Structures are given as C-alpha cells and as structure tokens.
Image (cartoon, rainbow, N blue to C red):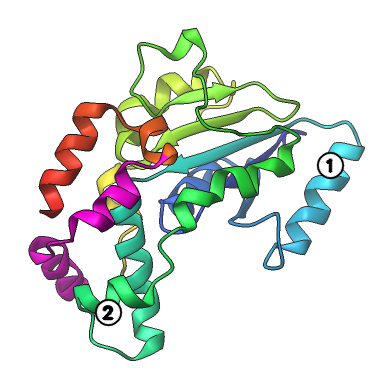
Amino acid sequence: MSDTLYVVHTMGRCGSVSVAGALMKERLNVIHVHRLRGENADRDAVSQICNHLEEKKPVRVITLIREPVARNISAYFTNHILWGVKPTVEDFLNRYRHDIPLKWIPEQLSFWDYTFQYPIVRPKEFEDYYPGTFLINTKSPVLFIRTMDLDKVWDRAWAMFSDKKVKMGRANSMAQPTRFPQIYHEFIRDAKLPVWYLDMMYQSDYTKTFFSPKEIERLYEIWQ
C-alpha cells in the first residue's frame, strides 16, 4: 500500500461514497470524511490524518462539488425518513438547513492550512476543463471535481493528481437516496421552488465559483 493518504473530504450527498469506494477498490490508503472542523468533526479521522502528516507522509484531498439545490433535496430525502414526515416543497423549505453547502468549504477546508475565500481562482492548467474542476496546491493538495462531471473529467484530472490508476463509475448514479426512489424522483420532477430560495442558492459565492453563468441560468429553469 502507498504511503500517500487520500482523503475524500466532501459534504454529504455529493457522491463521495462512490469515489471513496473506487479508491479503496484499488487498495489505496483512503479516509472518507464529511467534517474535520467543528463540534461534529470526525475525531478519529482528524487523529489519523494528523498522525500521517506528522510522519511527513503525503496527503491528497478530493472534494466533490454538487449544485446546492439538488444536494439539499437529496439530503432532505435522506433525513425525512428519520423525521417521519411526508416530503413536500413546503416542508423542505421550512425544515432543512439550506446553508450547509454555502458554508461548507470555508468552514471545513480550513483544516488543510489554506484559507479558502471566495472567489477561488482556478490554476491556468485547468482552464480548458469544466468550470468546477481544478487543483489547489497546498501542503496537502485539494482536487475539486463536480459530481456531474466525474465521468467526463476524472481520468485527466486524476492523472494530474496521482500516478495511481483509478476507474470511476458514472456520475449520474451517485448521491441519490436509495430508499423510496420513486417518491424522490417524483419530487424532483414536480418541485417548483420560489425565486427567493433559488437566488439564495444560485447567487451565492459557492455556486458562482463552481458553475458558469449559463449553467446557473439553466439551473433556474429546472426548478421554476
């Protein structure tokens, strides 16, 4: 097994289980974690990563990006089973904490000794990639890839990040709730969301960093 530790450090409902699984399949040293900062931080993961860094061994970080409305709906569906409520747009808007994807990067990626302040500038070598794919070279390099683009850009992006071969599955099957899929897909199909909510999500620094203006315009069309 390589001395390199690969940390899939991503907010929930972005396909990170599938990515971590693909890396583990290749017998790489992998930690899959959602939080390394704050009261809900995974202390075991923090300890393992810190020990690895103290031993001067390399650590590489993979952070997946998903458009925030779809991500929040997926998270809402994962939780609504525990809440015991019928999923509705009204309940989604009132019950779920919608700022999680907007705050996650500056809160969580500060663990890697890099101040992620918006806007994040993409390195020139990634300018011909999709808007949400780029590498930030810190002490522990962070590779950003959008979930929607994994099957398009994975091979090229990963080759700039690691010399290990890793085969990735199709992005469109990732990060979807596995329980009550029919109800979930009907919700996605029929949901019409208010403009104030879409503005909060799509005019955010998070969305503007990882999605182009034309893509954001298309996202508005999906939910109106």
Q: Which residues are the magenta region?
A: 181-204
Front disc: 1 or 2: 2
- Quadrant position of the N terminus in the picture: top right
26 to 185, vertically: above or below: above
Looking at the rendered structure, the kind of residue marked 2 is Asp
Q: Which residue is drawn at 66% across and 27% down?
A: 141
Circle 1 is placed at which residue position? 52
Query: Could you tell me residue 133's position as x and y percent?
Result: 42, 26
Q: Residue at x 69, y 54 (%)?
A: 36
209 to 204, vertically: above or below: above
- The answer to whether 174 appears left or right of 112 in the picture is left
Q: From mark 1 to mark 2, how far is it between C-alphas?
A: 43 Å
Q: Earlier in the sequence, mark 1 or mark 2?
A: 1
- The answer to whether 177 appears left or right of 161 in the picture is left
Circle 2 is placed at which residue position? 91
Instruction: Give the quadrant of residue 111.
Output: top right
